[in-house]
């Protein structure tokens, strides 16, 4: 590999999915993996195969779905059984990689592993040798919590696992503890003190607990790391991981500083960000670098004047570079199909057939009747809402709410079952949304707990669409996410809840048969 080329190792499907509340089904993981392929990542860490049958199947299907130029990776503990299961999931990949390892800090050795340094070292060596003996040509070894480890012991471990056959060495700042200067020095120390380290790929895996994940990863590559492990939108456990879009665009924009490149097709960044945000239900903060709604927005009159005269006065990145179009077509109820179709195409939305477009266009007209202007963000929300592939066991026919400071919040809901039966019920609650959900529960009768309800405005203004994301917990541990957007917050809340319920019903394999039928339509 060229010394000026940095590999991008994407762990959105593994470390990213460990974000509290994030949940992806197998089909969604495969769809994201295909988009990561279009984005141009070098490695996709598809999951932790031994953790569950679903994760095993997701890794297997991702391995079969992506091109033979992509390395597909599976995480394991340094345990033979884990490695065997990972290899079973990965062996259909054109470029398989097993990612195994152990902690190296005193904290991990003493409290988590309960092993001496020598015992842990021997376990790590055996794990690498076992993975290579199975026939896996590419083995990555992680030295967990490297940032708090004794450097001399870290050097010994890395030297030993390289001799055992490791091809990539992951040096994680697992707790986000290090500063950029310290993390860069750690990689420089490895290259200076570990024989054979120049013949393997050193990898930076940073967490954002102190807000320095991107800075640390960049310091690592300046010091000699040639792989960055990151996630789309920086999602991940606790404060998240290194953000793919941030490190990629830093290397791209400041090539004069780093002198390094990646294989990322930057124009796919925004589309990938939106896909991951929609599927995981994790919203991107408006001021998020590169992909946030405000990243290329200018509200100050001075800024607007400068940008209109010369974009570079206040923008160091051309938004088109990351797939965000600078110009906007202003859409309203008077816009015809041609204008709407053109703008959707510019935003990257494609339709399999005319019926799909008509479904979106009909919804557009409904929104446009309630808004003066339909913005790009509205169009993205409409497409996301209308193009969902969740089986529609129940769909909304009508919702009506009565509430006020002197009234008991009451909701009446009418639903249509997939067998065309129409059902209606009503209930009260401690608020209008609670009343709606109680009424739906009376009809559907599927036990669950609402664990999160989030609503935000898609755009500015009193006529903005409400974007609602909810999560419900059922069957003891499963989490289902629902998402919907509408100019009426109660309609959006109802549709989001129904989407989550439909996911729950679909996963259970059952079909709830309605008891109180008003009519068949």
Image (cartoon, helix red, strand yellow):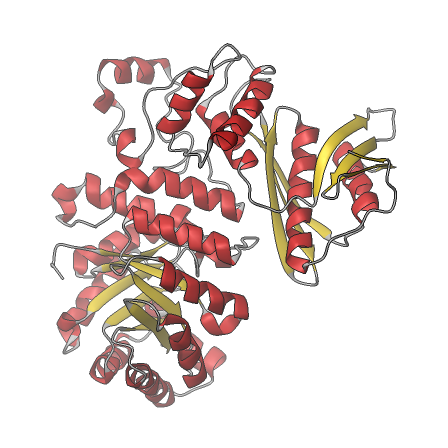
- Residue 464 image offset from top left, x and y in percent: 57, 22
- Residue 253 image offset from top left, x and y in percent: 20, 39
Residue 275 visible from this viewpoint: yes
Q: Residue at x 47, y 31 (%)?
A: 380
Camera-side residue: 10 or 89? Answer: 89
- Vertically, is 120 above or below 395? below
Residue 243 visible from this viewpoint: no
Q: Residue at x 69, y 53 (%)?
A: 505
Relative placement, left or right, of 81 versus 437 is left
- In which quadrant of the rendered view does residue 95 lie? bottom left
Relative placement, left or right, of 83 versus 510 is left
- Vertically, is 327 above or below 206? above
Q: Looking at the rendering, in which quadrant would you find the N terminus? A: bottom left
- Vertically, is 47 above or below 271? below
Camera-side residue: 325 or 292? Answer: 325
Q: Looking at the rendering, in which quadrant would you find the C terminus? A: top right
Relative placement, left or right, of 183 versus 109 is left
- Residue 395 image offset from top left, x and y in percent: 70, 38
Q: Residue at x 42, y 67 (%)?
A: 60
Relative placement, left or right, of 418 versus 15 is right
The tally of labels here is 0
- Vertically, is 315 above or below 463? below
- Residue 25 image offset from top left, x and y in percent: 53, 56
Direction top: furthest residue: 334
């Amino acid at each position: 590999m060229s010394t000026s080329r940095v590999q991008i190792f994407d762990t959105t499907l593994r470390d990213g999915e460990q974000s509290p509340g994030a949940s992806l089904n197998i089909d969604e993981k495969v769809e994201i993996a295909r988009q990561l392929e279009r984005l141009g990542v070098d490695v996709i860490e598809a999951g932790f195969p031994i953790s569950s049958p679903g994760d095993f199947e997701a890794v297997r299907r991702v391995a079969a779905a992506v091109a033979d130029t992509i390395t597909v990776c599976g995480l394991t503990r340094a345990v033979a059984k884990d490695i065997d299961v990972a290899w079973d999931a990965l062996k259909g990949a054109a470029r398989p990689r097993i990612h195994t390892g152990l902690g190296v800090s005193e904290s991990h050795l003493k409290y988590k592993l309960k092993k001496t340094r020598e015992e842990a070292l021997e376990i790590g060596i055996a794990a690498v040798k076992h993975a290579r003996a199975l026939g896996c040509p590419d083995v990555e070894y992680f030295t967990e919590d490297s940032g708090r480890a004794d450097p001399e012991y870290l050097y010994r471990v890395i030297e030993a696992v390289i001799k055992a056959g490791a091809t990539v060495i992951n040096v994680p700042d697992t707790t986000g503890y290090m500063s950029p200067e310290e993390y860069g020095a750690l990689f420089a120390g490895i290259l200076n003190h570990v024989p054979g380290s120049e013949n393997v790929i050193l990898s930076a895996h940073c967490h954002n607990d102190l807000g320095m994940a991107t800075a640390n990863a960049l310091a690592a590559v300046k010091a000699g790391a040639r792989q960055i492990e990151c996630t789309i939108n920086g999602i991940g456990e606790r404060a998240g991981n290194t953000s793919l879009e941030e490190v990629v665009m830093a290397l791209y924009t400041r090539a004069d500083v780093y002198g390094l490149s990646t294989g990322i097709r930057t124009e796919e960044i925004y589309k990938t960000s939106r896909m991951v945000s929609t599927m995981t239900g994790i919203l991107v903060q408006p001021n998020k670098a590169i992909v946030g709604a405000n990243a290329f927005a200018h509200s100050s009159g001075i800024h607007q004047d400068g940008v209109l005269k010369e974009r570079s006065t206040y923008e160091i990145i051309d938004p088109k570079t990351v797939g965000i179009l600078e110009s906007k077509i202003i859409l309203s109820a008077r816009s015809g199909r041609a204008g709407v179709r053109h703008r959707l195409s510019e935003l990257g939305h494609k339709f399999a057939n005319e019926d799909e477009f008509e479904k979106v266009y009909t919804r557009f007209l409904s929104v446009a009747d309630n808004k003066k202007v339909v913005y790009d963000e509205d169009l993205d929300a409409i497409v996301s809402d209308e193009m969902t592939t969740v089986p529609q066991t129940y769909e909304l026919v009508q919702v009506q709410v009565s509430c006020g400071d002197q009234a008991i919040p009451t909701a009446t809901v009418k639903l249509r079952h997939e067998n065309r039966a129409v059902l209606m019920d009503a209930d009260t609650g401690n608020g209008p949304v609670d009343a709606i959900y109680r009424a739906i529960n009376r009809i559907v009768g599927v036990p669950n707990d609402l664990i999160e309800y989030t609503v935000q405005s898609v755009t500015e203004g009193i006529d903005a669409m409400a974007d609602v994301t909810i999560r419900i917990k059922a069957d003891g541990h499963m989490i289902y996410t629902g998402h919907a957007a509408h100019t009426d917050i109660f309609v959006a809340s109802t549709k989001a809840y129904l989407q989550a319920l439909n996911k729950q019903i679909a996963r259970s394999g059952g079909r709830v048969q309605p008891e109180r039928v008003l009519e068949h339509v």
